[in-house]
Amino acid sequence: MRSYPRNSPEAAARLVTLALLADGDLSRIELQAVETLQVHQRLGLDREALREVLHDFCDDLLSTHRPWGESCRIDPQTLAGLLAEVDEPALRRLVLQLCVAIVEADRHVAEGESMVLVAAVEQWGLQHEMLDPTPVA
């Protein structure tokens, strides 16, 4: 798995991408949510840079030589390492809000998506953020 500088737009985008792929499917509805939420702009990237992060992350996942659905489930140590690349509190809150909005876009939270969200909330200590009824705009 490639690494990005701590708190970089790419590190944050990779976490959003992980949430997008965590159910093993690149859903049209969730992709539309990425566009509607202007994820690239909110993370400080242009559209092409966000696509590149998505593409590179898929390459990293596929390099495990497992079936696609299993590739999208990364081990807890790897997930913890990816989450650790974002340690700025405001960026953590933004990433979590974007991830929740994207995961909920199709009105179904799959097990893999839930695992990513729970890991982020626990590692980042953002349990109170999950109770905020204000959706990300």
Image (tube, grey):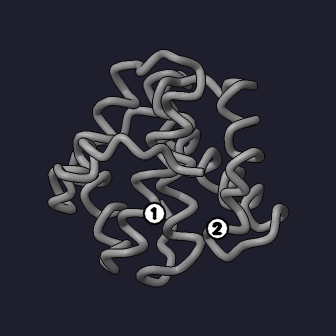
Closer to the N terminus: mark 2 or mark 1? Answer: 2
The quadrant where residue 75 appears? top left
The quadrant where residue 56 appears? bottom right
Q: Which residue occupies 35% across, 40% down?
A: 133
User: Helix, strand or loop at disc 1?
Assistant: helix
Q: Residues within 10 Å of mark 1 (few under 14, many from 20)?
A: some
Please name the residue that numbered disc 1 is placed on: 94
x and y percentages locating residue 71 in the rendered image: 47, 32
What amino acid is found at the position of numbered circle 2 in the picture?
Answer: Arg
Query: Given the current orientation, which residue lies at the most extreme front position?
Result: 134
In this rendering, position of residue 82 left or right of residue 64? left
What amino acid is found at the position of numbered circle 1 in the picture?
Answer: Leu
x and y percentages locating residue 14 in the rendered image: 54, 58
Q: Are marks 2 and 1 in contact (CB under 8 Å)?
A: yes
Q: Which residue occupies 42% across, 72% down?
A: 91
Q: What count of labels does the image hold? A: 2
x and y percentages locating residue 7 in the rendered image: 44, 80
Q: Nearer the viewer, residue 26 or 32?
A: 32
Compared with residue 46, is residue 105 higher up or lower down, i.e. above or below? above
User: Helix, strand or loop at disc 2?
Assistant: helix
In this rendering, position of residue 85 left or right of residue 50? left
Please name the residue that numbered disc 2 is placed on: 42
Compared with residue 73, is residue 39 higher up or lower down, i.e. above or below? below
